[in-house]
Image (tube, rainbow, N blue to C red):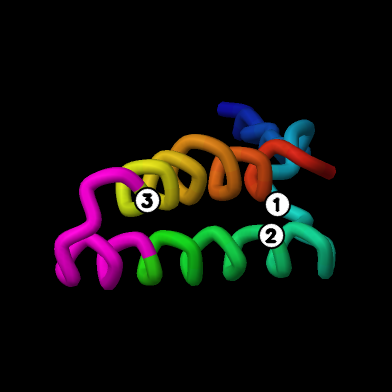
C-alpha cells in the first residue's frame, strides 16, 4: 500500500482589508464630531434653525467625507 501525500494548500491573501486613514481623514472626522456635539448643544438651548443645519453638516457631510477621501 502506498501512502498518498496530502497536498497542503496555502491560501494567499489577495485582498487587504486594511483601512489606511491619513492625518486629514482624522482631522475631518473629529471636526465632524465637534460640529455634531455643538449641534446637540445648540438644540438643547432651544435653537430650531441652527441646530439642524449643524447636525446635517456633521452627519451627512463631514463624517462621510472623512471616510471616503483617501
Q: Quadrant of the N terminus?
A: top right
Residue 63 is tagged as: none
Question: Alpha carbon of mark 2 to alpha carbon of mark 3: how far?
Answer: 20 Å
Residue 50 is tagged as: 3
Q: Main secondary structure of the magenta part?
A: helix
Q: Tell me the residue at 82%/62% (across/down).
A: 24
Q: Tell me the residue at 31%/44% (across/down).
A: 49
In the picture shown, does residue 31 fall above or below 2? below
Residue 18 is tagged as: 1
Of helix, strand and loop, which one carries label 2? helix
Residue at the spot of label 2? 28
Q: Quadrant of residue 7?
A: top right
Question: Alpha carbon of mark 2 to alpha carbon of mark 1: how far?
Answer: 20 Å
- Residue 28 coordinates in the image, percent (x, y): 69, 59
Residue range corresponding to the magenta coloring: 39-49
- Residue 61 coordinates in the image, percent (x, y): 56, 38
Amino acid at each position: 500500500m502506498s501512502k498518498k501525500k496530502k497536498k497542503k494548500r496555502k491560501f494567499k491573501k489577495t485582498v487587504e482589508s486594511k483601512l489606511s486613514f491619513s492625518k486629514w481623514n482624522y482631522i475631518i472626522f473629529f471636526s465632524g464630531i465637534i460640529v455634531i456635539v455643538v449641534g446637540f448643544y445648540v438644540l438643547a438651548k432651544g435653537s430650531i434653525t441652527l441646530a439642524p443645519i449643524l447636525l446635517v453638516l456633521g452627519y451627512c457631510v463631514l463624517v462621510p467625507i472623512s471616510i471616503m477621501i483617501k
